């Protein structure tokens, strides 16, 4: 896959058995770091967030999807699509991409502005994160 101006990293990852507590601790640490760097007031002017918003094409009139809570009207909302139609909306997750406590394998997709990352550096960062917090095994990894 190619997207002008972006590095796309994707990885097929599998949760290691017994790593649930480590994964929860990792999520808390990442959330703390993000909250230290970003807040709601500065989020809209963050260059990466602004660039990410340009990636999403708007939902069409009458377009809806099953969100994690209920049917969700996608008209005018930012969303990602694949060849089958709407895939996900950053406002609310949907059943197609739902991750639960029973999820042990997932497809990770990361969008990075090409002026701040290369395909090799993105792969290296993910592999280093897995080495320092071994909660998943990377089954496949690629970037473009």
Image: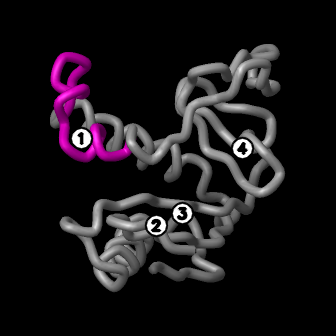
Are the residues at dot 1 and dot 2 in contact (C-beta closer than 8 Å)? no
x then y, percent, for residue 107 = 66, 63
* Mark 2 vs 3, N-terminal side: 2
What label does residue 135 carry, if any? 3
Mark 4 Cα shell of 10 Å, populated few (<14), some (14-19), many (≥20): some
> Rounded to the nearest whole Å, what is the CA distance between mark 3 and mark 4?
27 Å
Q: Residue at (44%, 71%) from the top-left corner?
A: 130
Please state which of residues 43 and 62 is positioned toward the viewer in this rendering. 62
* Mark 4 vs 2, N-terminal side: 2
Q: Is 41 part of what is drawn in magenta?
A: yes
Location of residue 13 by image quarter? bottom right
Farthest residue toward the front?
A: 61
- Residue segment shown in magenta: 38-52
x then y, percent, for residue 73 = 72, 16
> Rounded to the nearest whole Å, what is the CA distance between mark 2 and mark 3?
30 Å
Q: Is 120 part of what is drawn in magenta?
A: no
Q: Residue at (72%, 54%) from the top-left corner?
A: 82
Mark 1 Cα shell of 10 Å, populated few (<14), some (14-19), many (≥20): few
* Mark 1 vs 2, N-terminal side: 2
Which numbered disc, 1 or 2, marks the residue closer to the eye? Answer: 2
x then y, percent, for residue 67 = 75, 24
What label does residue 3 carry, if any? 2
Please state which of residues 74 and 38 is positioned toward the viewer in this rendering. 74
Q: Main secondary structure of the magenta part?
A: helix
> Rounded to the nearest whole Å, what is the CA distance between mark 1 and mark 2?
28 Å
Q: Is residue 77 left or right of residue 9?
A: right
């Amino acid at each position: 896959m190619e997207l002008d101006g972006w590095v796309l990293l994707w990885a097929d990852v599998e949760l290691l058995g017994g790593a649930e507590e480590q994964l929860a601790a990792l999520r808390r640490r990442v959330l703390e770091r993000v909250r230290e760097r970003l807040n709601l007031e500065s989020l809209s002017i963050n260059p990466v967030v602004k660039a990410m918003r340009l990636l999403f094409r708007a939902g069409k009139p009458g377009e809806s999807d099953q969100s994690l809570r209920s049917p969700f009207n996608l008209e005018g909302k930012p969303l990602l699509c694949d060849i089958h139609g709407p895939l996900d909306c950053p406002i609310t997750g949907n059943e197609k991409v739902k991750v639960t406590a029973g999820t042990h394998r997932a497809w990770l997709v990361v969008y990075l502005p090409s002026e701040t990352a290369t395909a090799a550096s993105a792969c290296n960062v993910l592999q280093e994160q897995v080495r320092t917090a071994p909660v998943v095994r990377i089954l496949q990894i690629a970037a473009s």
